[in-house]
């Protein structure tokens, strides 16, 4: 059974840092591209970041570029999101999600999601 | 980047048909996907590649595409279908979500 379990969320002051983790199990983690998606309280889903299967390629939403870093440890089956210079508007539930893509196109969707971890940025 | 536009809310009575639209200029060129999200839960994929239904998703869920608009149709809506629904698309430039539609079952 595929499982994604996020951890590391909590209350942090503006300007602070936090590192989120996503422990994966039930599939060959090193074969999949992975993402972080966030959802502010009462708001919609927003894509945050993406990393390829071996960690050599990453991309970010403009809102977090230069502040957040996505990484992975395939030996530990774990995805990370290092969040620095946090702002109030980063307050959200952060989900990790597994990408399912197609050989014939660059389109993809998210076939498995974790349950999310809440990050609250407040003084 | 591009935008995906959904109506904020749709209301239907039990047993009726609900239609939720998602519009975007890139949709003729890219597949659309639909997720259902209930309060306090992670999103669940209900439609992929515009109109394909994953295993385990009830047959009352279907998807269609026409030009710049994709539509999620829920036939014979049940109380348990009350949720937020999001469309999503993706290409080499990134991942994009619609703003979400709250489906209310009256």
Image: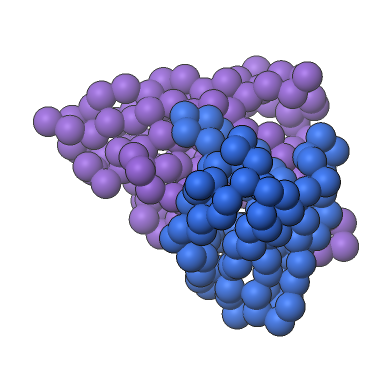
Q: Is residue B39 visible?
A: yes
Colour chain B is painted in = blue
Residue at the far left: name it.
A123
Rendered residue at 80%/27% (across/down): A28
What's the image's color scheme?
by chain
Question: Which image quarter: residue B88?
Answer: bottom right
Rendered residue at 68%/69% (across/down): B70
Q: Is residue A113 above or below residue A75?
A: below
Rendered residue at 80%/60% (across/down): B51
Left or right of A5 on screen, residue A61: left
Q: What is the x, y in percent for residue B39?
A: 47, 33
Q: What is the x, y in percent for residue A104?
A: 87, 62
Q: Is residue A110 visible?
A: no
Is B29 or A35 nearer to us in this picture?
B29
Q: Is residue B81 above or below residue A24?
A: below
Q: What is the x, y in percent for residue B74?
A: 70, 53
Q: What is the x, y in percent for residue B19?
A: 64, 62
Question: Which image quarter: residue A79?
Answer: top right
Q: Which chain is purple?
A: A
Rendered residue at 17%/33% (across/down): A122
């Amino acid at each position: 059974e595929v499982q994604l379990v996020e951890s590391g969320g909590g209350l942090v002051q503006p300007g602070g840092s936090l590192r989120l983790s996503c422990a994966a199990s039930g599939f060959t983690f090193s074969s999949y591209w992975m993402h972080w998606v966030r959802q502010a309280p009462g708001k919609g889903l927003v894509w945050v970041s993406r990393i390829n299967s071996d960690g050599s390629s990453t991309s970010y939403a403009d809102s977090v570029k230069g502040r957040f870093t996505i990484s992975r440890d395939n030996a530990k089956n774990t995805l990370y999101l290092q969040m620095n210079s946090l702002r109030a508007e980063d307050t959200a539930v952060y989900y990790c999600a597994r990408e399912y893509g197609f050989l014939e196109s660059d389109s993809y969707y998210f076939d498995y999601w974790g349950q999310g971890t809440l990050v609250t940025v407040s003084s | 980047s591009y935008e995906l536009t959904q109506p904020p809310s749709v209301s239907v009575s039990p047993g009726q048909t609900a239609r939720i639209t998602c519009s975007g200029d890139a949709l003729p060129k890219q597949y659309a996907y639909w997720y259902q999200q209930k309060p306090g839960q992670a999103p669940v994929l209900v439609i992929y590649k515009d109109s394909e239904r994953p295993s385990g998703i009830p047959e009352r869920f279907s998807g269609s595409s026409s030009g710049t608009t994709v539509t999620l149709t829920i036939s014979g809506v049940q109380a348990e279908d009350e949720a937020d629904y999001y469309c999503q698309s993706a290409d080499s430039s990134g991942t994009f979500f619609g703003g979400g539609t709250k489906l209310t079952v009256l």
